[in-house]
Amino acid sequence: MITIGLVQADIKPFNKKGNMAHYASWLESAIQEPVHLLIFPEMFNCGFSPDIMDEAELDNGESTYFLYMTANKFQCDVVATVPILQNGRLYNRLVWFSRDRILGKYNKHHLFMGEEELFSSGNDKTIVNTLGYKFLPLICFDVRFPEWSRNHVRNGVFDYDCLVYTANFPAPRESELMALAKARAIENQSYAIVVNRVGSDGYQRDYAGGCAIINPHGEIEAQTKTNKEEILIHSCDFDSVFALREAFPVSKFWEK
């Protein structure tokens, strides 16, 4: 059993420092009991905007330092994506911190229409082994591509136990995000966690939220309210994942 916090935030465009100051005070008041994992939305520090290149940082910039400090303050894992500039290329990079070190990095592979004009695509997935379980962190548009989320079983061992999607899914498509995440959970016999944002970005696109924890039956165990900032805290029982895999061993057909 692990306790997970989903941060459904209103990310203000062109206000990186203000966003992180808001997170710091908000988390201070909202996190009253221990959590094992905190997950922020995609582009947690700045959101998307036409000036995204101006918001980009190097790998050790102020936003990743904020994530590092948050992981240490709350003694938990912390996950978020940040625009990272590396070797002249801009990446939408997910970083997974665990207190004093980085457990994993992932550059978004499936870039949304228009996004590919600004960002470079990553080619490699990463499995994060932490807190006694294995996680596959992915980003937003990735949820639409089942093969990219595909779980595999090797000698009876599953690649992962939980999918994590950080997202900026606009309000008109929020229901699609939930439907897709449910499908990914069912077909991979894993939890699927979705963390989306609220508010408006630098393109004036509106977001209604839609953070949720979905079990491997495709059932929503916990979900945030729409159009409202919220930190949803929920404990996940991974024994139910393992029980389902044993009772309904559909995975033996996956490789055929």
Image (spheres, rainbow, N blue to C red):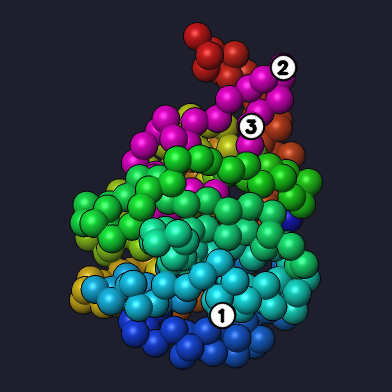
Residue 225 in sight: no
Q: Hey, what amino acid is under mark 1?
A: Glu
Q: Position of residue 45 (x, y in %)?
A: 46, 76
**Magenta stretch?**
137-160
> Residue 251: which quarter of the image?
top right
Quarter of the view holding residue 3: bottom right
* Disc 3 from disc 2: Cα separation: 11 Å
Residue pictured at 78% horizontal, 46% vertical:
132
Q: Mark 1 — residue?
A: 62
The residue positioned 49% from the left and 31% from the top of the image is 150
Judge whether 149 appears above or below 87 on screen.
above
Q: Name the residue under label 3.
A: 159
Q: What element carries label 3?
A: loop
Q: Which x, y percent locates residue 129?
A: 72, 45
Residue at 73% across, 55% down: 2
Q: Earlier in the sequence, mark 2 or mark 1?
A: 1
Q: Which residue is drawn at 24% across and 73% down?
A: 50
Q: Nearer the viewer, residue 254 or 226?
A: 254
Mark 1 or mark 3, which is nearer to you?
1
Q: Residue furthest front?
A: 87
Question: Residue at label 2?
Answer: 155
The type of residue carrying mark 2 is Asn
Disc 2 from disc 1: Cα separation: 42 Å
How dense is the environment of label 2, judged by Cα within 10 Å: few (below 14), some, or many (20 and up)? Answer: few
Q: Quadrant of residue 222?
A: bottom right
